[in-house]
Amino acid sequence: MVAVGGGKGGVGKSFVAANLALALARREAVTDRVVAVDLDFGGSNLNLLLGEPLPRAELGDFLDGRAPDLDAIAQPTRVERLRYVAGTFDMVTAVDPIRDRKLDLVRALVGLDARWVVLDLPAGSAPSTLDFFFLGDVKMVVLNPEETAFSNAYGFLKNYLLRRLLTEFRDRPEVVAFILGWYREEPSPEERRADRSVTTMATALAEEFPPLRAELDGILRDDTPLLVLNRTRGRREAAYLDRFRGVVETHLGLACRTLGVIPEDRRVRQAVRDGKPFLVAYPRHRIARGFEEWAERLSLRARIP
Ligand SMILES: Nc1ncnc2c1ncn2[C@@H]1O[C@H](COP(=O)(O)OP(=O)(O)O)[C@@H](O)[C@H]1O
Ligand SMILES: [Mg+2]
């Protein structure tokens, strides 16, 4: 499973999810079946980026119990081995459409009949979004070279990491209390200047509970999200990717890898206007070749863990 998140809206999560799913489905010499799933309830647009018409069935049909599983509502696309599960358009009145169905949805995602499931996540760091991100064997974070996107992507990873730790140690109330206490306690004026990064908290946690050290290291080292910087203009902006990785590694203690950079290009919009996915409209463009290369890399990584 590949989860595509990133915190901020409009950075290109759906664009990346759609074209990566296409690239995975169109790889030569393999016949992997792929499903792209739009989990952006209320903001769904994956079908547009895939160049597909309004779907006949959508996630709401599963959430409301009208469809038994996600294979029943997965729509075909113009690419033979790619199907997609459409988001939900008419949930305007629902406060939290998946509140009671999250576990069922997780099971349904895992149960999809496909080699690759690509999750297009919503903006923000809602607990359910973080949980769907956790489902990814491959976790991708999309950002743009601008401060707001940086800050949201950082916040997203920080929230993800804290939720992950709280979930992992939920049977150890003293550990949970330590983590919550670290962030909740009103800091004294002295401490206000002090470092409240996850790195410092994790170090203090390991000192307080030495047997947790190995598990903590595993969470911080082995779960390496892949970073994608989208909409860059020029080489200088491409360098932002390493800068972001450095900040995440220093302040969150979380090892990350950089997958690559996608330049800003007006043809991205043009393809949507023409009702075609980018990869189909401009197969020789370097952005398309980039997605193909990433699809190769992901499948190698998945086969050689
Ligand atoms: N590299 C790019 N160059 C130009 N426009 C882009 C690029 N990536 C995304 N866009 C445009 O930005 C808009 C938002 O992208 P989208 O994938 O829907 O963002 P998100 O899912 O993160 O909210 C889309 O209309 C898309 O056409
Ligand atoms: Mg989106």
Image: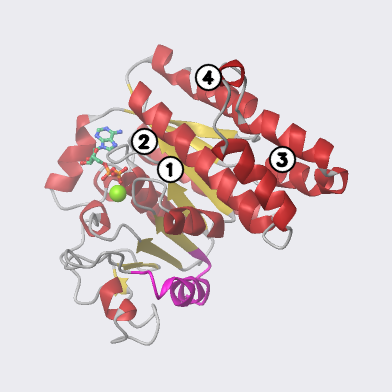
- Mark-to-mark CA distance, 3 and 1: 26 Å
Q: Position of residue 103 (x, y in %)?
A: 49, 73
Q: Residues within 10 Å of mark 3 (few under 14, many from 20)?
A: some
> What's drawn in magenta, residue-wise?
98-116
Which residue of the protein is positioned furthest toward the right in this rendering? Answer: 211
The span from disc 2 to disc 3 (Cα, nearest Å) is 30 Å
Q: Is residue 149 left or right of residue 206?
A: left
Check if residue 107 falls in the magenta segment: yes
Work out whether residue 285 or residue 245 is closer to the camera in this orientation and state it: 245
Residue placed under numbered mark 3 in the picture: 221
Above or below, 85 relative to 245: below
Q: Tell me which colouring the rendered structure shows.
A: secondary structure
Q: Which residue is mark 4?
A: 243
198 in relation to 15, above or below? above
Residue where numbered disc 2 is placed: 287
Asked if residue 262 shows in the view, the reply is no
Asked if the residue at tag 2 contacts the one at tag 1, i.e. Cβ–Cβ closer than 8 Å, the answer is yes
**Residue at position x 45%, y 45% in the image:** 292
**Residue 149 shows in this picture:** yes
Instruction: Answer with mark 3 or mark 4, whichever residue precedes in sequence.
Output: 3
> Label 2's element?
helix
Query: Do the CB atoms of the residues marked 4 and 2 lie less than 8 Å apart?
Result: no
N-terminal label among 4 and 1: 4
